[in-house]
Amino acid sequence: MTQQISVELPRYHNDEATRLLCGYTYLSTEFAGSVIQDLVAERLRAHGLPLGVDLVALVRHARVARRLHAIRDGLLTVCWLVLCFALVAAVVALTEPLAVRGERLGDCLQLAGCGLLSAVVVVFAAGLVCRRAARRIHRGEVSPREGAAAVASRVEEELDGPDETNVVPYGTSGKEELPFVGSGVRISETVWPGIEVGRPAKDDQGAALPMTPFDAVELHACLIERLADVSGIEELRARNRLYVQGHQAHDLGAELLPDPLRRPRTRIDPGLVEAGITEKERVMRTYLALDVVGAGGAYVVTMFVRARLSRSLLSWEVSAYVLPPLHALFDQVANLPRGRVEEVWRLIGITLSQLWKLLSRAPVRLLRRVKQRVRNAWRLWWDRQRILHRKGHFDYGTVGSVRSWAADLERLDYLQRMDVLDTFQRLEQGVLLTTEQFLREHNVDTSDFERAQTLITHHSYTFKGAVVGQNVFGNYGSNIASGPVSGTANGIGPAAGVGVGPMPTPAPRPGGTTPSRGRQGDAWVRTTSTDRSADRTSSATTDAIRSSSGAPRPPTRSGWPPSSWPCCVPRGWGGRMPPCCSTGSWRGPQRRAGPWTRAGPAPGWARSGTEPPRGAGRSAW
């Protein structure tokens, strides 16, 4: 008898993204303040979808971190005042007689030394407390929500609501209205070929079977019930959501806005949501949202589908999005040293290097916090006055999600790209198979469906960002990338520089660039390829997606902030919303003399340093 040996691989937290975000609040004063500003101080706009992040836990830890940072800044302000007083006293002592000058200068020097030593102790102790708190959150067994005290019950109820929401007001202040704001990078937007559903199926003898009438609402309900089993994705969450333009939220009355001076509700009557499935107006429509959160929240795949049933023709509107992993900044939490000797040694270096910066700017940070509170109170009063006096329609729509603002497209590695691809293909095939089963159960002839299915499965997904290697995304599809592309030249699609069909010979251009044409499906896509080295590394920019990829990235100072910062930043994260935020596009940083401008993509908490962190685990404070 053979003995069976059971071997288990290491298990990791399934809420890794939440733990990293919560831990980083202790390492960055700006980030903690931005979380409070966007999720608590903003009281009128709707919250973005959590997308794998526990917003309640994030706000709890941000509040604790803000208090620790306030205590640190208060003590450092006292030390700074002591140093200033010692300096003024030393200047006054220079005007006194020589008999007492030396004694007075000695007293001033002692006073300045005490102040400076106290500042060193405060910075070191605050860093030790904050870093250990961040490490405890990331590596502890307790859930992030239980690791901090609760905030106001009203705030937690509002933050818990978006997880089960069936209505999403979205902001319309950008140049392009995008209902799925905060869902990440757009991979595909298409309408599948129409299917004839007006012909009855036939039995074995060729007689027509009686058709069972159906509508789009029943088809959505069938997908919600069966899609998880058909696709084989256990983590799939399928629900109907009504997407409403933010400035038209008042049209739903008390169902969505019981109190116009507060945030919109996150759940409304399901009958209204179902009515939006057949709605044809541009103000509000219902989509079936298919959400899949990757292991540990490393990525989030979302597909929005909507049945279009017009007389006897059925088609599907499909939009696919992916949220890449968190930015490398948040890895500081995971890279904190475990050993005490290494922790103290590294913290001493950080204390000495950051001492003057933290000490000299402590009063400014305290004043800035008071100024922000006054500004929030004034803005809230002004917005409420506009609502009460009906001076235009107030935009209650959300402008994004915390998870999307913290994501970095460049970090989608090979394993995650394969997982994302597998998820998209499973969702696509699941929608098709479930639709076919639904039509057969209603005795509908599916011969036209089989023809359309062949065309549907030959589409392609678009990943915008750095793509390394020879890749083919989608079933018989092509990979289109905007950004650095390196790999062999024998790929398929514009990213490799060759198409799937015959192409005319390109004519050379001045400057060494050669235009080439690649074919994607039935559309010709023009690309530009430039040889840079002997290893055939090329840079391809596709005209087809140039409109959504933003302007070219200008050079940054010392490579900071990271060139992959998303431009979608809310008002509390470094300024008002840039116009491109509603498009889900990505831009490089645009900087001028002074703080980050309205078009600058870096959040406010990224302004704490002027260069990337040196070494793993270094705190940016």
Image (cartoon, helix red, strand yellow):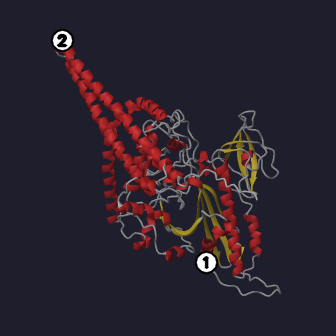
Q: Nearer the viewer, mark 1 or mark 2?
A: 2
Is residue 1 visible in the rendered structure shown here?
Answer: yes
Q: 492 or 71: nearer the eye?
A: 71
Other-residue count near label 1 (Cα within 10 Å), few / some / many at <14 / 14–19 / ≥20 = few
Q: 129 or 111: nearer the eye?
A: 129
In which quadrant will I find the N terminus?
A: bottom right
Dot 2 falls on a residue whose secondary structure is helix
Q: 502 or 183: nearer the eye?
A: 183
Residue 152 position within the rendered picture, expressed as x and y whole percent measured from the top left:
35, 59
Q: Earlier in the sequence, mark 1 or mark 2?
A: 2
In which quadrant will I find the C terminus?
A: top left
Q: Mark 1 — residue?
A: 218
Q: 572 or 227: nearer the eye?
A: 227
Residue 597 position within the rendered picture, expressed as x and y whole percent measured from the top left:
45, 43
Residue at 74 percent across and 73 percent down: it is: 449
Is residue 395 visible in the rendered structure shown here?
Answer: no
Look at the picture and state if 319 lies above or below 545: below
Q: Is residue 453 left or right of residue 246?
A: right
Residue 71 position within the rendered picture, expressed as x and y whole percent measured from the top left:
32, 42
Amino acid found under the numbered disc labelled 1: Glu
Dot 1 falls on a residue whose secondary structure is helix
Residue at 41 percent across and 66 percent down: it is: 264
Discs 1, 2 touching: Cβ within 8 Å: no
Q: Mark 2 — residue?
A: 98
